[in-house]
Image: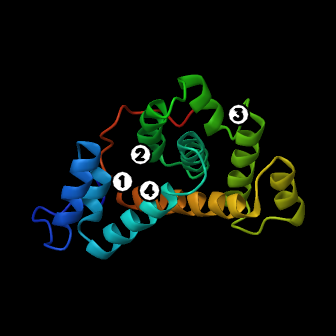
Amino acid sequence: MSRIQAPQSVPPASQPLLDAVQKKMGMVPNMMKTLAGAPTVLEGYLAFSGTVGKSSLTAAQKEEIALAVGQVNGCQYCVSAHTLLASHAGISAEQAKEARSGRSSKPVDAAVLKFATQVVEKHGKVSDADVQAARSAGLTDGQVLEVVAATVLNILTNYLNNVAEPVIDFPVISLTI
């Protein structure tokens, strides 16, 4: 059972946001139903998610970041959701497992995952060498910032889900790798 319940009566400010999610995804995930209880939080999350979605990172890289960050933060809801979403981005089950461990067989994706994981584990206080390693792997400074933004977006959802504990409405994935 969820620690914080989705509102039984959706606040008027949240309804158009949930309708847009339904139209885009074909469903409204329990996480977003829960966030509907705080319309400004739901609106902020959706706006930030939409903006990060426009970055130069590939859909696969964004899903890999979500998996790695979700694993580090112990968010079973996010790991479950993004394992499914990653499959839609062309990521195999084995690649998803690798991403959860912060690894990829593709050098640039490996650098993206390593840097995202460093951002989480070091609470943003990465070293000059960490940034240089990302650059040396082919990331531009803009892409380094995009990795930070994608990482922070996932930290937000990880923390919201770890606090609220919505019922997982995706195929459940164990956090054990």
Which amino acid, by three-letter code, is at mark 1? Answer: Glu
Q: Which quadrant of the structure image shows residue 84? A: top left
Camera-side mark, 2 or 4:
2
Q: How many residues crowd mark 2 within 10 Å: few (<14), some (14–19), many (20+)?
A: many
Q: Is residue 78 above or below residue 121?
A: above
Residue that mark 4 sits on: 162
> Looking at the image, is mark 2 or mark 4 earlier in the sequence?
2
Disc 3 secondary structure class = loop
Q: Residues within 10 Å of mark 4 (few under 14, many from 20)?
A: some
Task: Name the residue type under label 3.
Answer: Ser
Residue situated in front as seen by the camera: 135 or 101:
135
Residue at position x 24%, y 63% in the image: 17
- Three-letter amino acid code at the position of disc 2: Tyr
Which residue is pictured at 71% across the width and 60% down the height?
Answer: 144
Q: Residue 26's x, y, as percent?
A: 23, 42
Residue 22 percent location from the top left of the image: 22, 49
Name the side, left or right, on which 98 lies relative to 125: left
Q: Tags 1 and 2 in contact by the CB under 8 Å rule?
A: yes
Upstream in the sequence, badge 2 or badge 3?
2
> Tag on residue 165?
1
Q: Earlier in the sequence, mark 3 or mark 4?
A: 3
Residue 171 sits in which quadrant?
Answer: top left
Dot 1 or dot 2: first in sequence order is 2
Whether residue 135 is visible to the viewer of this picture, yes or no, is yes
Give x and y (percent) for residue 145.
Answer: 67, 64
Q: Residue at x 76, y 53 (%)?
A: 139
Q: Residue furthest left?
A: 9
Is the residue marked by circle 3 packed among few (<14), some (14-19), or many (20+) residues within 10 Å? many
Name the mark on residue 104.
3
- Closest to the observer: 38 or 112? 112
Q: Are marks 4 and 1 in contact (CB under 8 Å)?
A: yes
